[in-house]
Structures are given as C-alpha cells and as structure tokens.
Image: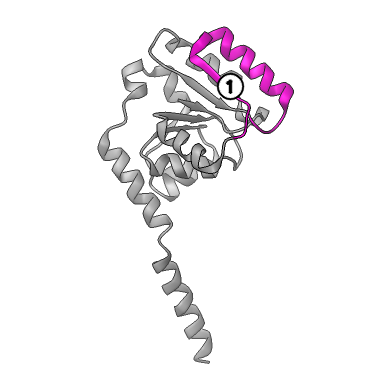
Amino acid sequence: MQIGNSATKTNRHIAILRQLSKFKNENIKIFAPLSYGDPIYAKAVIKEGKRIFGKKFVGITGFIKEAEYYQFLNNMDISIFDINRQQALGNIFSLLYLGKKVFLKDNSVLAHYFRTENHCIINTMHEIEQMAFEEFIKFPKEYQVSNEDRLEQMFDLAPLMNEWNNIFNEKLSY
C-alpha cells in the first residue's frame, strides 16, 4: 500500500502509520513516496515507519521516472491520503482509474470531490478504525470498474467540446 505522496507534514504519514499499526502482523508492505518536500520530515517518517513495521515499511527518497512511477502506482492495492487540501490529485486520479482502493480524509474537499461530485467509490480515514484486515484490503471488481468508468467520463473531451461549441455558436449567432 501507498501512504501519502511527498515529504510534507500535510500528508500526515505518522498518524496514518499509527492508525495502520493494528495491521502490523498482517502480510503487508507500506510504501511512502518521500522524494520531494522536507528531508527532515522524511527522516522522521522513515524512522517511525521502521519502528512500527520494520522491513514492511519502505520510505522512497529517490526520484522515480514517470513511467516507473505509474507502474509503482499500478502495483499498489491500497492508497491512503490523509490530507486536508488539494494535493496528490495525479496520484488519486491514476489510482482510482487503475482500480485501487483509495482512502481519503473524512470531510475533506478531496473526499467530497471524488465521492459526491464524481460518484467515485472511495473510503475515508475513520473507516479504518472499525475495519478488520479482510475488509480493509477488500475492493470488489465492480467498484474497480465503476471508478474506471467514472474517471473515463471525467476526462472524455467530447461532451466538453460540444458544450463549448454551443457557447461559441450561440455568441456568433448574435
């Protein structure tokens, strides 16, 4: 699983690690991309991740080429972004399209955007506390397909082009 997307405190890595500690004896591996941002914070995240999860935690401090990073995302089963503000959108869009289970901060602008505005199937951080491991890792195929379909619709340019053509044609007819 992936937690966060950069070495910034707004990713709340340490809080996530502590929340996930109940799964430390399960067959998991946690990856934290920390290649840009605050290097002191990155070291603190790595120290806490290793303390709780040992070899099951990997702090990624080197930069990864774009194609390799997309493959990295494709290899994740779960991603967790406990962020309040708009960040990690490229990661989240890609992960949802790839059929991955995504957890977002409760009542955040991102959770609202993906769940309410775009009807994607996401989970929120508070749900982790009540989940058994089997529920935590489960993400049915129909949810994966639904999210992929929603993302395809979001990025389909044809309706947008039609809308703009109508606007321009309306203005030209005056």
Q: Kindly identify the residue that appears in the image at 60 percent across and 35 percent down.
A: 84
Name the side, left or right, on which 121 lies relative to 73.
Answer: left
Q: Is residue 27 above or below residue 160?
A: above
Q: Quadrant of residue 140?
A: top left
Q: How many marks?
A: 1
Seen from the viewer's position, the closer of residues 63 and 81 is 63
The spot of residue 27 in percent (x, y) is 38, 13
Residue 74 visible, this angle: yes
Q: Position of residue 57 (x, y in %)?
A: 52, 16
Q: Position of residue 5 (x, y in %)?
A: 57, 33
Does residue 125 belong to the magenta stretch? no
Local SS, label 1: strand
Q: Main secondary structure of the magenta part?
A: helix
Q: Which residues are magenta?
A: 35-63
Residue 30, given in percent of the width and then of the height, sits at: 49, 20
Residue at the (45%, 37%) spot, across then down = 71
Image quarter of the N terminus = top left
As rendered, which of 60 and 153 lies closer to the eye?
60
Residue that numbered label 1 is attached to:
59
Q: In this rendering, would 81 be left or right of 123?
A: right
